[in-house]
Image (cartoon, helix red, strand yellow):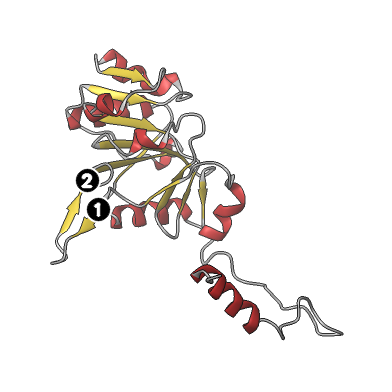
Amino acid sequence: MSTSARETILAAIRTALADTPTGTAGDEPPIAREYRTAHVHTGLVDLLAENLADYRAHVHRTSPAELPDVIARLLAEHGATGVAVPNGLPEEWLAAARAAGIVLTADTPPLSPEVLDQTDSVITGCALAIAETGTIVLDAGPGQGRRVLTLIPDHHICVILCPEQVVASVPEAMPKLDPVRPQTWIAGPSATSDIELDRVEGVHGPRRLDAVLVVSADEADPKYD
């Protein structure tokens, strides 16, 4: 009977590991794994903002009280007339947008890809954000919605609560995430490069990412004129 490529590879691995002990032998000390889990421990919100901007995300800082107005302004600037809203998004975040007459469509029942293709923007929260890498992580929790909600619309507004949702590094993020949940890791707007290294945005996700950092009132950006 012929041997499959998989069986051949596994047999080679077993042969290579044949003389490898399965555990710590005798009185050999265990291998120390005291790795550094983060390179910074202070100024995480500033570092997150800097790295998000490096990835060409548009970063805004606002207080909780002004968050609804900031969301409404960003939607108006984008010319959004149809906006997808995931289940569990705090209703108070949407008050100013509703007052401005912007159409907000809940994802209940689930919006079809055809409807989402005609949707200008989506507003979500996040599971957490990683300062050292400028990464936002969504895990389909309340206020984040299905992955497709943040992949089809051209404009994504993502709200990050600071400092409680900000961690320093990937090693610090992993224990806080549920490995069985569908995760989306975002670093700026969707982008790729062609063979000549010309950057193209919006190929497999939103063309514009507005990251809204909700901070204390004294850390918020000045009011817009």
* Residue found 55% across the figure and 64% down from its top: 38
* Quadrant of the drawing holding the C terminus: top left
* Front-lying residue, 73 or 198: 198
Residue displayed at 24% across by 53% down? 191
Q: Residue furthest front?
A: 1
Cβ atoms at labels 1 and 2 below 8 Å apart: yes
Q: Is residue 29 left or right of residue 153?
A: right
In this view of the protein, which residue sits in the foreground, 1 or 190? 1
Give above or below for 29 relative to 140. Answer: below
Residue 202, which numbered label? Answer: 2
Q: Position of residue 154 (x, y in %)?
A: 23, 37
On screen, residue 209 versus residue 13, left or right, reads left
Mark 1 Cα within 10 Å, few/some/many (few <14, many 20+)?
some
Question: How far, Cα to Cα, is label 1 from label 2?
Answer: 6 Å
Q: Amino acid at mark 1?
A: Ala
The numbered disc on residue 191 is 1
Q: Quadrant of residue 202?
A: top left
Q: Can residue 169 be seen by looking at this rendering?
A: no
Q: Three-letter amino acid code at disc 2?
A: Gly
Residue 155 location (% of width, % of height):
26, 36
Task: Answer whether residue 125 is visible to the viewer in this image.
Answer: yes
Task: Provide residue 108's location: percent of width, then percent of height.
Answer: 41, 18
Q: Residue furthest right?
A: 26
Q: Secondary structure at mark 1?
A: strand
Query: Going by the image, does 83 lie left or right of 160?
Result: left
| Residue 20 vertical placement versus 71 (above, below) | below
